[in-house]
Amino acid sequence: MPNPSRPRISAAHRSALEANPWFDSMSRTQREALLGAAELIHVRRGAMVFRQGDPVHVAGAGFYGLAAGTIKISTLRQDGREAILAVLEPGNWFGEISLIDGSPRTHDATALSALDLMVVPYEAFARQMQDAAFARAIAALLAARVRGLYGLMEDATLRGLRARVARRLMSLARGDVTQSPELRRSVSLPQEALAMMLGVTRQTLSKELNAMAQEGVIALGYGRIELLSIDALQRLCIAP
């Protein structure tokens, strides 16, 4: 992890963070307190922000706010294949679980691009948690995480692949972890990464995507998927 610096957060950074529904739901006083406790670091593309099993009480660890760039949250399966759990876009905060229970990191966090990252150290996070309003905000963040995990479990155990693909595309169209109320019409993600999210082979996913494209639900481009019919996708999302 690069050495932290203390430049003032830029207007672009602030705009990215405040566009996130969770961060924006807090009062201005709470937001400023959180940013005031954070250090800005720069992370190169491909670097690990943290690894699964890393202790939380180490230099550079903390509660992270992604001000610029994209992060992959992933883990390795027993057969050595990577499973992508989520893709974080600017505005998202993460890493709170280990700070709350003191246990090691639960997964890998890898920079898919160069990052500007706000880091709230463990001690500063603990002080913030003494404020009841901030603690409630963290509880709401955790509740959203749990809802998302339940959704993934439901998809994996109760739904067919076509429905799972449609539901993940809809989630990605809202920023995946961000879950913005605004729905994008284009998802920028390689098909290989989407296959890793769904736990299927690239070939299996390709068959489903091509079938959906032939039905006029989506259009496939290089590194992106266009959502042509939101209504059709929503119908697929509730299919068994």
Image (cartoon, helix red, strand yellow):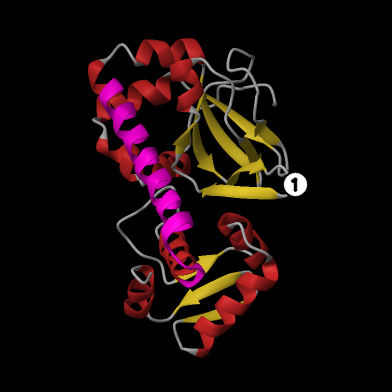
Q: Tell me: 6 left or right of 236.
A: right
Q: Tell me: 114 left or right of 65.
A: right
Residue 60, position as x, y percentages in the image = 62, 20
Compared with 6, 14 (above or below) is below
**Which of these two is toward me, 83 or 173?**
83
> Which amino acid type corresponds to the residue marked 1 in the rendered image?
Asp
**Residue matched to label 1:** 79
Compared with 14, 128 (above or below) is above
Q: In which quarter of the image is residue 17?
A: top left
**Which residue is located at x 35 percent, y 21 percent?**
33
Residue 116, position as x, y percentages in the image = 58, 37
User: Which element is circle 1 on?
Assistant: loop
Q: Tell me: 218 left or right of 18.
A: right
Q: Can residue 70 be seen in this view?
A: no
**Which residue is located at x 42 percent, y 44 percent?**
149
**Which of these two is toward me, 73 or 59?**
73
**Which residue is located at x 63 percent, y 69 percent?**
223
Compared with 170, 85 (above or below) is above
Residue 232, position as x, y percentages in the image = 36, 80
Q: Quadrant of residue 192?
A: bottom right
Give the magenta range: 135-162
Q: Is residue 167 visible?
A: yes
Magenta span: predominant SS is: helix
Residue 100, position as x, y percentages in the image = 43, 18
